[in-house]
Amino acid sequence: MNPSTVRRHTLGTLAAALLGLALPLAHAQEPWPSKPVTLVTPFAPGSGPDAVLRLVGEKLGKLWNQRVLVDNKPGGGGFLAIDAAKRAPADGYTLLQLDSEHLAALPLLYKSRNFETLKAFEPTGILFRTPFMLAVAADSPWKTVGDLIAAGKAKPGSISFGSWGVGSPGHLGGEELELRAGLDMQHIPYRDVGQLYGSVGAGDLHWAFGSIPSSQGAYKAGKLRYLAVAAPRRIAQLPDVPTLAEAGGPPLEINSFVVLVAPRGLPAAVRDKIHADVAKAVAEPDIQARFNTFAFETLPWSPAEIEKQAAAKAKVYAELVKRKSISLE
Protein backbone atom coordinates (compact mmCIF):
# COMPACT_ATOMS: atom_id res chain seq x y z
CA MET A 1 0.00 0.00 0.00
CA ASN A 2 1.56 3.30 -1.07
CA PRO A 3 1.83 6.28 1.34
CA SER A 4 -1.04 8.11 -0.34
CA THR A 5 -3.38 5.18 0.13
CA VAL A 6 -2.33 4.75 3.76
CA ARG A 7 -2.95 8.44 4.41
CA ARG A 8 -6.44 8.28 2.87
CA HIS A 9 -7.24 5.13 4.84
CA THR A 10 -6.04 6.73 8.12
CA LEU A 11 -8.03 9.90 7.52
CA GLY A 12 -11.11 7.88 6.66
CA THR A 13 -10.78 5.80 9.83
CA LEU A 14 -10.29 8.96 11.94
CA ALA A 15 -13.33 10.63 10.37
CA ALA A 16 -15.49 7.58 11.06
CA ALA A 17 -14.30 7.47 14.67
CA LEU A 18 -15.05 11.16 15.16
CA LEU A 19 -18.49 10.70 13.62
CA GLY A 20 -19.12 7.77 15.95
CA LEU A 21 -18.26 9.98 18.92
CA ALA A 22 -20.36 12.86 17.63
CA LEU A 23 -23.54 10.81 17.20
CA PRO A 24 -24.01 9.91 20.91
CA LEU A 25 -22.94 13.44 21.87
CA ALA A 26 -25.62 14.91 19.61
CA HIS A 27 -28.13 12.47 21.08
CA ALA A 28 -27.12 13.44 24.63
CA GLN A 29 -27.61 17.12 23.81
CA GLU A 30 -31.11 16.56 22.43
CA PRO A 31 -33.32 19.31 23.87
CA TRP A 32 -35.50 18.26 26.80
CA PRO A 33 -38.36 17.44 26.59
CA SER A 34 -38.56 15.62 23.28
CA LYS A 35 -41.52 13.43 24.25
CA PRO A 36 -44.56 13.55 26.63
CA VAL A 37 -43.99 14.06 30.36
CA THR A 38 -45.99 12.16 32.99
CA LEU A 39 -46.90 13.69 36.35
CA VAL A 40 -47.68 10.94 38.85
CA THR A 41 -49.70 11.93 41.92
CA PRO A 42 -50.87 10.10 45.06
CA PHE A 43 -53.84 12.50 45.30
CA ALA A 44 -57.28 11.48 44.06
CA PRO A 45 -58.89 13.12 41.02
CA GLY A 46 -60.78 16.24 42.04
CA SER A 47 -58.72 16.89 45.18
CA GLY A 48 -57.07 20.27 45.70
CA PRO A 49 -53.52 19.13 44.85
CA ASP A 50 -54.82 17.25 41.80
CA ALA A 51 -56.67 20.33 40.53
CA VAL A 52 -53.53 22.46 40.91
CA LEU A 53 -51.40 19.82 39.21
CA ARG A 54 -53.71 19.74 36.19
CA LEU A 55 -53.69 23.52 35.88
CA VAL A 56 -49.90 23.66 36.12
CA GLY A 57 -49.60 20.67 33.79
CA GLU A 58 -51.51 22.57 31.08
CA LYS A 59 -49.13 25.51 31.41
CA LEU A 60 -46.07 23.25 31.29
CA GLY A 61 -47.41 21.51 28.21
CA LYS A 62 -47.49 24.85 26.40
CA LEU A 63 -44.03 25.83 27.62
CA TRP A 64 -42.57 22.48 26.59
CA ASN A 65 -44.62 21.97 23.44
CA GLN A 66 -45.31 18.43 24.64
CA ARG A 67 -48.20 16.54 26.14
CA VAL A 68 -48.16 16.53 29.95
CA LEU A 69 -50.14 13.63 31.38
CA VAL A 70 -51.47 13.35 34.95
CA ASP A 71 -51.49 9.82 36.37
CA ASN A 72 -53.48 9.52 39.62
CA LYS A 73 -52.39 6.66 41.87
CA PRO A 74 -54.04 7.27 45.26
CA GLY A 75 -53.82 4.76 48.08
CA GLY A 76 -51.21 2.85 50.03
CA GLY A 77 -50.23 5.87 52.10
CA GLY A 78 -48.74 7.41 48.97
CA PHE A 79 -46.61 4.36 48.14
CA LEU A 80 -48.60 3.36 45.04
CA ALA A 81 -47.54 6.60 43.36
CA ILE A 82 -44.08 6.61 44.92
CA ASP A 83 -43.27 3.06 43.79
CA ALA A 84 -44.49 3.77 40.25
CA ALA A 85 -42.35 6.90 39.95
CA LYS A 86 -39.34 5.32 41.63
CA ARG A 87 -39.11 2.71 38.87
CA ALA A 88 -38.88 5.37 36.15
CA PRO A 89 -35.54 6.51 34.66
CA ALA A 90 -34.00 9.68 36.09
CA ASP A 91 -34.52 11.57 32.84
CA GLY A 92 -37.23 14.11 33.74
CA TYR A 93 -39.99 12.39 31.80
CA THR A 94 -41.63 11.08 34.98
CA LEU A 95 -42.23 13.55 37.81
CA LEU A 96 -44.02 12.91 41.09
CA GLN A 97 -46.26 15.26 43.07
CA LEU A 98 -45.81 14.98 46.85
CA ASP A 99 -46.68 17.07 49.87
CA SER A 100 -44.35 17.95 52.73
CA GLU A 101 -45.72 15.08 54.82
CA HIS A 102 -44.74 12.55 52.15
CA LEU A 103 -41.25 14.04 52.34
CA ALA A 104 -40.95 14.48 56.09
CA ALA A 105 -43.40 12.17 57.88
CA LEU A 106 -43.69 9.08 55.69
CA PRO A 107 -40.27 7.65 56.65
CA LEU A 108 -41.25 8.01 60.33
CA LEU A 109 -44.67 6.39 59.95
CA TYR A 110 -43.44 3.37 57.95
CA LYS A 111 -40.15 2.60 59.68
CA SER A 112 -40.00 -1.06 58.66
CA ARG A 113 -39.88 -0.06 54.98
CA ASN A 114 -36.55 1.67 55.58
CA PHE A 115 -37.54 4.23 52.96
CA GLU A 116 -36.42 7.85 52.95
CA THR A 117 -38.29 9.91 50.38
CA LEU A 118 -35.54 12.42 49.74
CA LYS A 119 -32.93 9.73 49.22
CA ALA A 120 -34.99 8.25 46.40
CA PHE A 121 -36.21 11.54 44.93
CA GLU A 122 -34.92 15.08 44.45
CA PRO A 123 -37.10 18.22 44.40
CA THR A 124 -37.60 19.91 41.05
CA GLY A 125 -40.16 22.60 41.85
CA ILE A 126 -42.63 23.88 44.40
CA LEU A 127 -46.31 24.33 43.59
CA PHE A 128 -47.80 26.00 46.69
CA ARG A 129 -48.05 26.10 50.48
CA THR A 130 -51.36 26.17 52.33
CA PRO A 131 -52.02 27.35 55.91
CA PHE A 132 -54.54 25.58 58.14
CA MET A 133 -57.50 27.04 59.97
CA LEU A 134 -58.64 25.83 63.39
CA ALA A 135 -62.35 25.11 62.89
CA VAL A 136 -65.09 24.51 65.45
CA ALA A 137 -68.87 24.22 65.17
CA ALA A 138 -70.62 27.51 64.48
CA ASP A 139 -72.45 27.19 67.82
CA SER A 140 -69.39 26.11 69.81
CA PRO A 141 -69.14 27.85 73.20
CA TRP A 142 -65.46 28.52 72.54
CA LYS A 143 -64.83 31.97 71.12
CA THR A 144 -61.03 31.78 71.17
CA VAL A 145 -58.28 29.17 71.13
CA GLY A 146 -57.64 30.22 74.72
CA ASP A 147 -61.16 29.00 75.55
CA LEU A 148 -60.43 25.63 73.93
CA ILE A 149 -57.17 25.27 75.87
CA ALA A 150 -58.81 26.23 79.15
CA ALA A 151 -61.56 23.65 78.62
CA GLY A 152 -58.99 20.99 77.78
CA LYS A 153 -56.92 21.69 80.87
CA ALA A 154 -60.02 21.72 83.10
CA LYS A 155 -60.98 18.24 81.93
CA PRO A 156 -58.06 16.30 80.38
CA GLY A 157 -59.03 13.80 77.69
CA SER A 158 -62.44 15.38 77.12
CA ILE A 159 -61.65 17.22 73.86
CA SER A 160 -61.66 15.44 70.52
CA PHE A 161 -60.07 16.63 67.29
CA GLY A 162 -60.28 15.07 63.86
CA SER A 163 -58.15 14.84 60.75
CA TRP A 164 -58.19 13.27 57.31
CA GLY A 165 -55.93 10.41 58.42
CA VAL A 166 -53.16 9.29 60.75
CA GLY A 167 -49.97 11.13 59.85
CA SER A 168 -51.78 13.88 57.91
CA PRO A 169 -50.83 17.50 58.62
CA GLY A 170 -54.19 17.88 60.34
CA HIS A 171 -53.31 15.04 62.70
CA LEU A 172 -49.70 16.01 63.33
CA GLY A 173 -50.70 19.66 63.67
CA GLY A 174 -53.20 18.69 66.34
CA GLU A 175 -50.56 16.66 68.13
CA GLU A 176 -48.23 19.66 68.08
CA LEU A 177 -50.94 21.93 69.48
CA GLU A 178 -51.60 19.36 72.21
CA LEU A 179 -47.90 19.19 73.10
CA ARG A 180 -47.18 22.94 73.05
CA ALA A 181 -50.37 23.84 74.93
CA GLY A 182 -49.98 21.08 77.52
CA LEU A 183 -53.25 19.32 76.62
CA ASP A 184 -54.48 15.72 76.49
CA MET A 185 -56.86 15.29 73.54
CA GLN A 186 -58.38 12.42 71.57
CA HIS A 187 -57.54 12.16 67.87
CA ILE A 188 -60.22 10.70 65.56
CA PRO A 189 -59.13 10.06 61.95
CA TYR A 190 -61.61 10.21 59.07
CA ARG A 191 -61.31 8.88 55.54
CA ASP A 192 -63.76 11.35 54.06
CA VAL A 193 -62.99 15.06 54.38
CA GLY A 194 -66.64 16.04 53.94
CA GLN A 195 -67.65 13.75 56.79
CA LEU A 196 -64.86 15.19 58.96
CA TYR A 197 -66.11 18.77 58.75
CA GLY A 198 -69.71 17.60 58.88
CA SER A 199 -68.92 16.01 62.24
CA VAL A 200 -67.26 19.19 63.49
CA GLY A 201 -70.25 21.25 62.35
CA ALA A 202 -72.69 18.88 64.07
CA GLY A 203 -70.74 19.00 67.33
CA ASP A 204 -69.83 15.29 67.21
CA LEU A 205 -66.19 16.35 67.05
CA HIS A 206 -64.88 19.36 68.93
CA TRP A 207 -62.48 20.78 66.35
CA ALA A 208 -60.22 20.13 63.38
CA PHE A 209 -57.56 21.84 61.35
CA GLY A 210 -58.50 22.44 57.74
CA SER A 211 -57.34 24.26 54.64
CA ILE A 212 -59.73 26.77 53.12
CA PRO A 213 -60.67 24.59 50.11
CA SER A 214 -61.26 21.48 52.22
CA SER A 215 -63.40 23.17 54.86
CA GLN A 216 -65.04 26.01 52.95
CA GLY A 217 -68.17 24.03 52.07
CA ALA A 218 -69.16 23.62 55.71
CA TYR A 219 -67.89 27.12 56.52
CA LYS A 220 -69.95 28.82 53.81
CA ALA A 221 -72.98 26.76 54.86
CA GLY A 222 -72.70 28.35 58.30
CA LYS A 223 -71.79 25.10 60.05
CA LEU A 224 -68.21 26.03 60.97
CA ARG A 225 -66.46 28.93 62.61
CA TYR A 226 -62.73 29.58 62.37
CA LEU A 227 -61.10 30.35 65.71
CA ALA A 228 -57.66 31.00 64.24
CA VAL A 229 -55.25 30.54 61.38
CA ALA A 230 -52.12 28.58 62.29
CA ALA A 231 -49.76 31.06 60.65
CA PRO A 232 -47.44 33.88 61.76
CA ARG A 233 -49.75 36.48 60.19
CA ARG A 234 -53.43 36.80 59.37
CA ILE A 235 -54.39 35.93 55.83
CA ALA A 236 -55.95 38.40 53.41
CA GLN A 237 -58.80 36.03 52.56
CA LEU A 238 -60.05 36.02 56.18
CA PRO A 239 -58.62 39.17 57.78
CA ASP A 240 -60.91 38.98 60.81
CA VAL A 241 -59.62 35.55 61.82
CA PRO A 242 -56.72 35.92 64.29
CA THR A 243 -53.52 33.88 64.36
CA LEU A 244 -53.20 31.09 66.91
CA ALA A 245 -51.02 33.31 69.08
CA GLU A 246 -53.48 36.22 68.86
CA ALA A 247 -56.32 33.88 69.82
CA GLY A 248 -54.64 32.72 73.03
CA GLY A 249 -52.76 29.69 71.71
CA PRO A 250 -49.09 28.89 71.16
CA PRO A 251 -47.41 30.61 68.16
CA LEU A 252 -47.53 27.59 65.83
CA GLU A 253 -47.33 27.37 62.06
CA ILE A 254 -49.37 24.43 60.80
CA ASN A 255 -49.14 24.16 57.03
CA SER A 256 -48.32 21.84 54.18
CA PHE A 257 -46.42 22.47 50.97
CA VAL A 258 -46.75 20.59 47.69
CA VAL A 259 -43.86 19.93 45.32
CA LEU A 260 -42.75 18.07 42.22
CA VAL A 261 -39.87 15.62 42.59
CA ALA A 262 -37.97 13.31 40.25
CA PRO A 263 -35.97 10.12 40.76
CA ARG A 264 -32.45 10.91 42.02
CA GLY A 265 -29.81 11.35 39.34
CA LEU A 266 -31.65 13.84 37.16
CA PRO A 267 -29.29 15.83 34.89
CA ALA A 268 -28.72 19.27 36.43
CA ALA A 269 -29.76 21.10 33.27
CA VAL A 270 -33.08 19.24 33.15
CA ARG A 271 -33.71 19.82 36.85
CA ASP A 272 -33.00 23.54 36.48
CA LYS A 273 -35.31 23.81 33.47
CA ILE A 274 -38.17 22.06 35.26
CA HIS A 275 -37.67 24.29 38.30
CA ALA A 276 -37.69 27.48 36.22
CA ASP A 277 -40.70 26.41 34.14
CA VAL A 278 -42.76 25.37 37.16
CA ALA A 279 -42.09 28.81 38.64
CA LYS A 280 -43.26 30.42 35.38
CA ALA A 281 -46.40 28.29 35.32
CA VAL A 282 -47.54 29.03 38.87
CA ALA A 283 -46.87 32.75 38.29
CA GLU A 284 -49.48 32.88 35.51
CA PRO A 285 -52.31 35.31 36.42
CA ASP A 286 -55.12 32.75 36.21
CA ILE A 287 -53.30 30.33 38.51
CA GLN A 288 -52.44 33.11 40.94
CA ALA A 289 -56.11 34.12 41.00
CA ARG A 290 -57.07 30.54 41.88
CA PHE A 291 -54.35 30.38 44.53
CA ASN A 292 -55.53 33.65 46.05
CA THR A 293 -59.04 32.26 46.49
CA PHE A 294 -57.69 29.42 48.65
CA ALA A 295 -54.87 31.30 50.42
CA PHE A 296 -52.32 29.12 48.61
CA GLU A 297 -48.91 30.74 48.86
CA THR A 298 -46.36 30.83 46.04
CA LEU A 299 -42.81 30.35 47.28
CA PRO A 300 -39.46 31.11 45.58
CA TRP A 301 -37.78 28.00 46.98
CA SER A 302 -34.88 26.35 45.21
CA PRO A 303 -34.58 22.54 45.28
CA ALA A 304 -32.06 22.91 48.11
CA GLU A 305 -34.46 25.10 50.10
CA ILE A 306 -37.25 22.54 49.65
CA GLU A 307 -34.98 19.89 51.17
CA LYS A 308 -34.09 22.25 54.02
CA GLN A 309 -37.77 22.96 54.79
CA ALA A 310 -38.62 19.26 54.64
CA ALA A 311 -35.82 18.52 57.10
CA ALA A 312 -37.18 21.15 59.50
CA LYS A 313 -40.63 19.53 59.38
CA ALA A 314 -39.13 16.07 59.84
CA LYS A 315 -37.46 17.24 63.05
CA VAL A 316 -40.81 18.37 64.50
CA TYR A 317 -42.64 15.28 63.27
CA ALA A 318 -40.02 12.95 64.75
CA GLU A 319 -40.73 14.39 68.19
CA LEU A 320 -44.50 14.01 67.76
CA VAL A 321 -44.33 10.48 66.34
CA LYS A 322 -42.02 9.28 69.11
CA ARG A 323 -44.15 10.90 71.83
CA LYS A 324 -47.30 8.97 70.86
CA SER A 325 -45.67 6.00 69.04
CA ILE A 326 -47.62 6.95 65.92
CA SER A 327 -47.35 4.40 63.14
CA LEU A 328 -49.12 3.34 59.96
CA GLU A 329 -47.71 -0.21 60.00
Image (cartoon, rainbow, N blue to C red):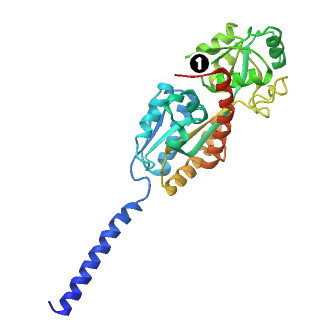
| Number of residue marks | 1
* Quadrant occupied by the N terminus: bottom left
Taking 74 as reference, is 322 left or right?
right
Disc 1 element: helix
Q: Give x and y (percent) for residue 62.
A: 48, 48
Residue in the foreground of this view, choosing between 7 and 108: 108
Kindly identify the residue that appears in the image at 75 percent across and 23 percent down: 179
Q: Amino acid at mark 1?
A: Val
Kindly identify the residue that appears in the image at 50 percent across and 28 percent down: 112
Q: Is residue 302 in sight in this rendering?
A: no
Taking 212 as reference, is 77 left or right?
left
Badge 1 is on which residue? 193
Q: Give x and y (percent) for residue 271.
A: 52, 52
Quarter-of-image position of residue 294: top right
Residue in the foreground of this view, choosing between 27 and 59: 27
Q: Give x and y (percent) for residue 157.
A: 74, 10
Quarter-of-image position of residue 227: top right
User: In the image, is residue 112 above or below residue 139?
Assistant: below
Residue in the foreground of this view, choosing between 233 and 264: 264
User: In the image, is residue 100 above or below residue 247?
Assistant: below
User: In the image, is residue 156 above or below residue 248?
Assistant: above
Taking 292 as reference, is 41 left or right?
left
User: In the image, is residue 203 above or below residue 283?
Assistant: above
Residue in the foreground of this view, choosing between 223 and 102: 102
Q: Give x and y (percent) for residue 151.
A: 81, 11
Kindly identify the residue that appears in the image at 29 percent across and 74 percent down: 17
